[in-house]
Every structure is written in C-alpha cells, then in structure tokens.
Amino acid sequence: MKGTCFVIQGFGKKTDYTDGRILDLDASYEIIREAVEAAGLDCVRADEIVHSGTIDKPMYEMLLEADLVIADLSTYNVNAAFELGVRYGLRPRATLIVAEEQFRNPFDVSHIAIRRYRHLGEEVGYKEAKRFRTELQQAIEALLAGNATDSPVYTFLPELQPPQPAPRGVPRMADAREPVGSPPPPAGADPFASPPSPPPAPAVPLPGSPLPPPAAPEAVPPTAKALLEAARACINPPPGQPSDFATARMLLEQVRVQRPNDPFVLQQLAFATYKSRQPTTEAALQAARSILLELGPATTNDPETLGLWGAVHKRLWDAHRQPADLDEAINAYERGYFLRQDGYNGINLAFLFDVRALEALRRGDGAAHDEATADLVQARRIRGELLRRAADAGAMDAPRCRDEGATAARYWQLAILWEAAVGLGDEARATQLDAEARALPVAEWMQTTRLEQGALLRSLLTDIAARRP
C-alpha cells in the first residue's frame, strides 16, 4: 500500500498581506504534488478530502496518520502555521516546510529548514518549477529513508511519547458502533421486566424467488476542489459558450459550507453572486455586499477584496446615483491601487475619477469646477502610470500563455492597458491592444465587459469635454 502525504496549504489565489502580492497556490500545489508522487506517495490537500460535514475531523486524522506532511507557509497562512504546530505535536518526524522565496520566517524556531520556491503570481516559471520539483523529491526521499527527528517538540522534549495511530483498516474507538455490554435500564424502569425482543431476522428468499434489489450506495459528497473547479468552469466556459453565474453561485455556496472562512471562496462567491443578477440585480448586489462584509473591507489590505467591494458599489452607484456609493467605490479602488499598484483597481479608479468630475461639472459652480479638474488630472496620471509601468516591465511583449489561468491573466492585463490608452486618447495604441485582446481565447463575458466599459468611457469623456470651458 502506498504511503500518504498530506499537504497543508491554502487553495486558490491568496494575498500575502505583508506586501500585497497575490499568489496562486494551486500552481504551487501542482509542483508539490508532482514531487510527492515521483517519490512514491499519494498526495492529498484538505480541499481534496472526501467527507461530509466539517473538515476538522478528517484534517486532524491526516495530521496524525499521514506518512509525510508538507506545510506551505506562503502568504503567512495562519491556518497552515497552526496545523503545522499540531503535526509537530503529534509526530516526531516526517514533516517538511516550504514557502515562497519572499516569506520571512517570523517564528522562534528559525533554525528549522524551509525549502524555498519562486512564485510569479499567476504561475511558477518552467525552470523554477523543474528545479523545485527535483529538490523537493530528493528531500522527501531522504527524509523517508532516514529516521531523524524534525519536530522541535520532540527535539527539545525527547522524553515525550507520540500517540500511536490506529493500524490502517482498523476502525477508531470513537467510530465503533458495537455497544460494549448491555446499557443500564433507564431511571424508573422495572428492573425485572423482560428485555425487549430482538428485531426479526431478515427474511430469506425461497429458492427460485427473485432477489431483493441491492441497497443504494451511500452518496459520496463532492470535494471542495471538485466543486470549485465546476464553479470556475461555469464562470469561464470554453469560447463561444455563455457563462452560468447562477450555477457557479450555487456551487460556491456548497464550497462555503466546507470552507466557511476561506477568503478566496468568499471572493469568488461574491463575484458570482453579483454577476448572477438573481433574483434581481439589486438583490444580487446587496447579497454580494453582505458576503464581502465578512472579509472586513473597511480595514483589509487585500487588493482583491477591495476590487470586489469597489465593483459592487460602482454598480450600486449606477443603479441609484447615490453619492455615498460613488465615494465608497472610489475609496476602495484607491486603497487597492496604492497598496500595490494593482492594475484592476487603478483603471477603475481612473474611470470613477472621471465620473465624479462629470458630476461636479454638472453642478456648474466654481468650486465644483476646481474639484472636477483635480479628479481629471488624477485620472490621466493613473492611466499614464499603468502604461509606463507595463512598458518598463515588458508587459507589452507577445503573450506567453501555457494554461487557462495565464491566458485570462494576460487578457485582463491587455484590457487594463487598452482602457488606459482609450482614456488618454491614444487611439493607435488602443487599436493595437484591442487586436491582441480579441485574439485571446477567453470567455465571452470577459470580452463583453471590456467593450462595454470602453464604450462607457468614450461617452463619459465626450460629455466631460462638452461641459468644460
């Protein structure tokens, strides 16, 4: 029987709150899984465990029983650090720590080896993936071949005796269903009463009679990973097929039951909810807003949460024209942009600066004109920064997309730069970027969103120009 490796790691995209970078941990997990399987072990992460109810019990069982545990502490994942501590308390050996190269060890046990890998955000580069996979496989094989203690708990408290997991195939005592002895009679019962008759034995079919139908097998609940992948497929179907945000929302609600406090799940659920527009656009926006409140948008430094919070209030502004919604959207996008120069937040911030400028020009007084001028200057400055930063980083090069996630990331990069060029009136650059964006095989809603936003921006700038002296 193969041994098992349990990987302690978040899933999906997670924000490193120390620097605002967003890492796709699913890309990291693929490399870890390949190294584990090459070393001869089965690999599983918490979102791949088949279970009903809470994940806590099977997770603790895996921390105790797994032949190897790999903990990825990238993004300063508190849950991962906690689970690593539990593993160290349960098993004296067979635990490895990995982390992205910019992780700075905050723990007192800084002498413990951490194997590093370099993450590019959406993916791990090919050469780095190959290097890290090889290094990790060699580390796993050496660890399993030896008998060294790697838990600091058992290193510094060598007299401790670790708990012994039940042998494979033997049920745990807590799971036993056979009673030991007869239970005492309930209070007030006649102690001399005859015991209840045993249930009748099942009928045995006579020779030649049809056999009863077999009992239906117990349904196996889908894993969080399977549900999340199905939801993503609904959001981003193959080109030419419409997105199904309502079904994605339903699937993500099921993921939320299994992973109620995972920021990535809540972010995806909020997005699918407001995009579903069900039962009405207004109700969907308010439901998405309620979901995002669980992520603390007033104090968070997660650009993804801030971008979603801004998007919801931008749409509430479109629906009701309430200044409070416009200001809330601007504040969210502004924080998201300046935290890490996030392009999505920046391009939306520039657009809403223009929207607020137009509202001021409609008022027509001198003070409003000054406010409008200030907003218009900021909008142009942000668009210029986005284009300059992309050129400096070589982001205008031809796309190098190896998978669906990288293709989508490249598309949104082009969409942001295209809108920036449109906003600055650089039609030659806008035409070039539009052609590149149209050529990418992405979901229909992504192209539609970009083109609708561009049409709104052009109309907005025309209206502003007509009102300025």
Image (cartoon, rainbow, N blue to C red):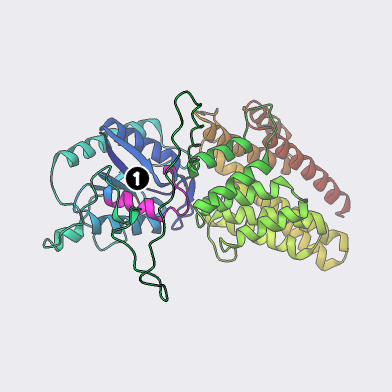
Q: Nearer the viewer, residue 233 or 373?
A: 233
- Relative placement, left or right, of 123 versus 350 is left
Camera-side residue of 168 and 280: 168
| Rendered position, 427 above or below 358 | above
Of residues 362 and 78, the one drawn nearer to the viewer in this rendering: 78
Label 1: which residue?
Answer: 7
Name the image quarter holding the C terminus.
Answer: bottom right
Task: Give the percent coordinates (x, y) of residue 172.
Answer: 29, 52
Q: Is residue 444 left or right of residue 336?
A: right
Above or below residue 30? Residue 153 is below
Mark 1 neighbour density, 10 Å: few (under 14) some (14–19) many (20 or more): many
**Which residue is located at x 42 percent, y 76 percent?**
188
* The stretch drawn in magenta includes residue 49: yes
Looking at this view, name the residue that lies furthest to the left.
159
Asked if residue 130 is positioned above or below residue 181 in the image, the reply reads: above
Q: Quadrant of the N terminus?
A: top left
Residue 282 falls inside the magenta stretch = no
Residue beneath the point at 28% across and 42% down: 169
x, y (%) of residue 3? 26, 38
Where residue 272 appears, as percent x and y from the top left, is: 65, 46
Q: Residue at x 59, y 40 (%)?
A: 231
- The magenta segment is 48-64
Q: Is residue 248 visible?
A: yes
Amino acid type assigned to the residue bearing label 1 in the image: Val
Q: Residue furthest top?
A: 208
Q: What secondary structure is marked by label 1? A: strand
- Which residue does the image show at 64% across and 39% down from the upper left? 417
**Closer to the camera in the image, 398 or 155:** 155
